[in-house]
Image (spheres, grey):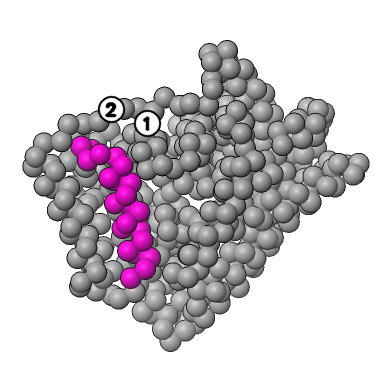
Amino acid sequence: MGQGGEEVVSVINVHALDYHDETSYGFLRRVPSSLKVVLTVAVAICIAVLNSFSAQVFLLAYSIFLVAISRIPLKTLLKRLIALDGFVLMIWLTLPFFSEDGMRMAALITIRVHAAVLAFMALLQTTSMPELLQALNQLHIPRKLIVLLHFTYRYVHVLGEEALKIQHGMILRGFAPSLNLSTFRTYGNLIGMLLIRSIMRSQRVYDAMLLRGFDGSFPFSTRQAKLSRPDVVRIVMLFASLMGCLVV
Amino acid sequence: MHISEGVLSVHTLAIGAACAVIGVAAGLKKMEIDKVPRVGIVSAALFVSSLVHINVGPTSVHLVLNGIGGLLLGLKLFPAYLVALFLQVLLFQFGGLAVLGVNTSTMALSGIIGGYLGRCIISSGKPPWLGGAIAGGVGVVLAGVFTALALAFSGDVFVVTAKLVLFAHIPVVIIESIIGAFVMTFIFKAMPSFVGECKKWE
């Protein structure tokens, strides 16, 4: 892997299927994950609902503050933001030319997009998947939806590896993608193979689960970090300062 | 393909969220807890497949596969898309939390309609490639139309953007129907029991 020649024919990008950063044990890691989910939703709603410039700038500042205390590595952060800024660039290339209000709208969208993404990253990249599932359960999200999230996340990784194996086989047999029918047939076969393997695997997985007594219940993590008094104060301040966007 | 955070107006977001809640509730009702692993694993396969990117001239498009998803999962595509799009926000920062409802509705509803047409074609005895092509093509056409409608509904500023979105979908529709045809041909060659298999899930 990683050789120059391989990059050219790489069909599927299965890298970056992990989101959780092993960041150092910062304050946001200690905040109970259900509170982080609530805060994420609250920030997203505020960003979507409020229309004034000052409120949006406040929310952007709030998000930057969250990222600053989240201890997410700068490299990860920049990589995510660059992917995002392609979209922002497109907004700036289209909106200002087609409407009088376009300039203001483009600026507002730019602020909103960055605020939303930064807050989301700061709050949820510091939450591992088991913690997230536990939090959703505490917030009374339907059990079936949570189990579905668990299985999809788990098997995205398994099937990503499976896809890589198929891709290696294709490359070894001299597959070179271009824009023609035989390339499309190859892609069709790749996806068809992946789907068939997933269907058969799901049968085996389910049988194995039944043998182990699966009855629809799900073992949620019950790990809960102990909160110190200063941490409680910090959490209250975190929520209280979000209210600031309503008054500015 | 789907809309980013911070673009749509509040009432569009609210309508999208309401549609998504109804759709997801209907999908969950159809999905017994013992079917959840199956739907999750198939939806993971679709997720991985949609990472396939195809170079068209200077840019590359990635596959959508919502029509094929509708063919395989039916109404259960709604919860599957909600989860998959949430994972996309988590993993790649595509889309966002507030537009999750709109994106789930546009992608899942179009996929379900396309998939339903595809299933009708296949079960009426027509060749599977035709069903796959129709499912793939119709899924993406409707996804483009719904996305453009959501944009246009959010304000006159976005009407031009909405038209651009529609035009950008034309090459994707062609690619998606060809790929859909090949996928279904392959599946029926390698696993002829497939239609019965799908029906069993209902």
Residue ID at (44%, 69%): B10
- Which residue sits furthest top? A211
| Closer to the camera in the image, A167 or B109 | B109
Give the residues drawn in magenta, as a range: A29-50
Dot 1 amino acid type: Pro
Total numbered circles: 2
- As drawn, the residue found furthest toward the left would be A230
Q: Residue at x 79, y 48 (%)?
A: B118
Q: Is residue A19 visible?
A: no
Q: Which one is nearer the viewer's eye here, A226 or B44?
A: A226
Left or right of residue A145, residue A172 in this image: right
Asked whether B181 falls inside the magenta stretch, the response is no
Residue B94 showing in the rendered view: yes
Q: Position of residue A233 (x, y in %)?
A: 11, 47
- State the residue position of label 1: A130
**In the rendering, which numbered label is found on residue A223?**
2
